[in-house]
Amino acid sequence: MSKPAVFEPKGVIPACLLPFHADFSIDEPSYRKHLRDVTRIAGLSAITINAHASEVASCNLEEQERILAITMDEVGARIPVVHGVYADGSFEAARIARMAQSGGASCLLVFPPGPLALGSQCRPEMVIAHFKAIADASDLPIICFQYPLASGLGYPVDTVLKLIGAVPSVRAIKDWCNNVMQHERQIRILQNLPRPVSVLTTHSSWLLSSLVLGCNGLLSGSGSVIADLQAALWQAVQANDLVLARQINDRIYPLASAFYADPFVDMHNRMKEALVILGRIPCAAVRPPLVKLGDTEIKRIRQALADARVMREGAELALAA
């Protein structure tokens, strides 16, 4: 039997949400439905689980393992699964990586560990040591999550290049540098290396502007709500159809403005409320320290969905609902 092809992270990759019951336990039937809703969209390359969009910070390892098992059972036979590696310690990150590979994931999305915020930008060997521990535990391809440099958790371009040289399984970055000049520089450098490394944008609040710079794809939590629009925008940009891309972006804009408003921490909270309004999940519960949105903001999300012409299941979205 031939060995399965190694997943190459590029194209459109939505990050799925994780529905909870009102008591904060995982709503498995609603999660399965959410997976089916997202993956029925044509033009996707993969989905991402156990990441920011699914509130991974509040999920223990056993819950993450269960989430992966549900995902593989429901959709794993027809779409690759990118699994987040969210841990402050390299040993725990390696344990998550082993679990993800044994559970059937096709790729790892590695978050920067919190302790690096205290000055690791002067010590690139720390970043490399973290990724080596993960790569030693799993031979899956790795997406490096690139944070803004101002956060203390971002990696200077020189560090990214050292990392790629030291850990060949790094095949892409999920770029949230939030700096247009750095973003374009990373696209131009990384995608033109002798062994190219893809730049997947997660600048979902300015997605069209980012994609036209030449990214090899996008990895976005708002794909949990509008995977169809993101796939259509990606295809229009790839076809160099700027007129169509602008038309699609005009539909995305109201939702991007609503989802990524201040405070930024509520972005996935807002996406859950959108799915409730659309009738796709029954409850928008989020685990503390996140808290439920107020009625005024939920009304804004409802209006943004109407402005974007996103339809409720089986019927047009009613603003008075």
Image (cartoon, rainbow, N blue to C red):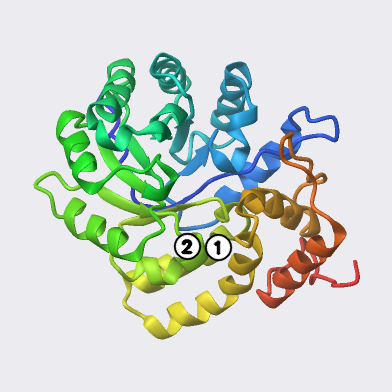
Q: Position of residue 62 (x, y in %)?
A: 61, 16
Q: Which residue is nearer to you in this view: 3 or 223?
A: 223
Q: Which residue is nearer to you in this view: 281 or 257?
A: 257
* Residue contact at pointers 1 and 2, CB within 8 angstroms: yes
Q: Is residue 110 visible?
A: no
When asked about the image quadrant of residue 130, the answer is: top left
Residue pictured at 76% horizontal, 59% vertical: 278
Report, in whole angstroms, how far the alpha carbon at label 1 lies from the one at label 2.
5 Å
Tell me: 55 left or right of 14. Answer: right
For disc 2, the marked residue is: 231
**Residue type, numbered disc 1:** Asp
Residue pictured at 63% horizontal, 45% vertical: 36
Q: Position of residue 228 (x, y in %)?
A: 55, 62
Residue pictured at 30% horizontal, 52% vertical: 199
Residue pictured at 48% horizontal, 21% vertical: 103
For disc 1, the marked residue is: 228
* Label 2 SS: helix
When asked about the image quadrant of residue 304, the answer is: bottom right
Is 193 located above or below residue 76 in the figure? below
